Amino acid sequence: MSFKTSVIIPCHNGELFLAEAIESVLCQTVAAAEIIVIDDGSTDATPQIVSRYPQLRYLRQAQQGVSQARNAAAAACQGDYLLFLDHDDRLLPEAIELNLKAFAAHPDSGFVFGRCRNIDTDGLPLNSENRSILEQRYDPPFYPQLLQGNSIHPPARLMIQRQAFEAVGGFDGSLQVSEDYDFCLRLAAAYPGFCHNQPVAEYRNHGYSVSNRVRSTQHLLAALKVLDRQLPKLQDHSEYEAAYQQGKRHWQTVYSPYLVYDLMKSLKSGQWSDAVASLGLMLRYRPQGLLDYGLERLGLSKLRAVD
């Protein structure tokens, strides 16, 4: 029996990188059965770029966010397996082939995935300490590792059985950040998976991405919310409880040093509710934040870069 792969590319104002993402799918050693670009309310040249590729399916919706775009395209696609490629990332030529071979060898898996490479804005290899985790091996068990804060990012690393995607409810459209993390936690909690540890995708590090635009306060709140959703699954599993606690510490360590910058930006712009949120988190998780900020302004210390 031949299984079909649908590659879904959600896009909002992606004219800078969209063509590269599309070309990376067209150059696969095993072709996708269909490629869907779902335009989430773009106001740039996205439609014109897609029109160069008549073999693509083009869907468009009013802007609702990447999660809703992914879900809408998944509902419209024909594939047995789903692969979500962000418009600014790229697949490596053997991505689909490697993932299909992994499914053939592990047919009970709800998902399979590989490793990722970091690239810069120009698509060149990037040695990034902050994102080096994406390039490292990922060994089972996956669910407790995700609880600990290890994410399977970006989504292009994953190939998912459509049945598994639908069973866990797809992506949560209420989340503006950490939606990938939330989805992977639910998926790994419900289904066995397999990592073949071969590189399958390239993650582009650039200043236009949502992860770079969204403030640390939002990231931390979302990550902790996503973790707390897993609490019902932790009962009678002491190893999961320990992993959950480690995950909370992980995200606090990653984002809390930068809450003070969010606080200062919010105060300067008069965004009082945002300032209160940042201050509350800082007092709880980084009470020395104002001291750190003062010392840094005086040139006496330097905050480390975000992981």
Image (tube, rainbow, N blue to C red):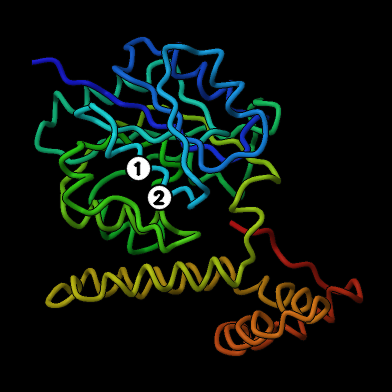
Disc on res. 72? 1
Contact, mark 2 vs mark 1 (Cβ under 8 Å): yes
Residue at image point 70% right, 63% down: 304
- Which amino acid lies under the numbered mark 1 shown in the image of this protein? Ala
Residue at image point 40% right, 13% down: 28
Asked if residue 291 lies left or right of residue 38, the reply is right
Asked if residue 301 lies left or right of residue 61, the reply is right
**Relative image position of residue 74 (x, y in whole percent):** 30, 38
- Quadrant of the rendered structure where residue 79 is? top left
Packing grade of label 1 (10 A; few <14, some 14-19, many >=20) is some
Residue at image point 60% right, 74% down: 256
Q: Nearer the viewer, residue 77 or 227?
A: 77
Asked if residue 301 lies left or right of residue 233, the reply is right
- Quadrant of the rendered structure where residue 262 is? bottom right
Disc on res. 284? none
Disc on res. 68? 2
Packing grade of label 2 (10 A; few <14, some 14-19, many >=20) is many
CA gap, disc 2 to disc 1? 6 Å
Question: From the viewer's perspective, is residue 215 above or below residue 81?
Answer: below
Question: From the viewer's perspective, is residue 198 above or below residue 67?
Answer: above
Q: Nearer the viewer, residue 88 or 257?
A: 88
Q: Nearer the viewer, residue 136 or 294?
A: 294
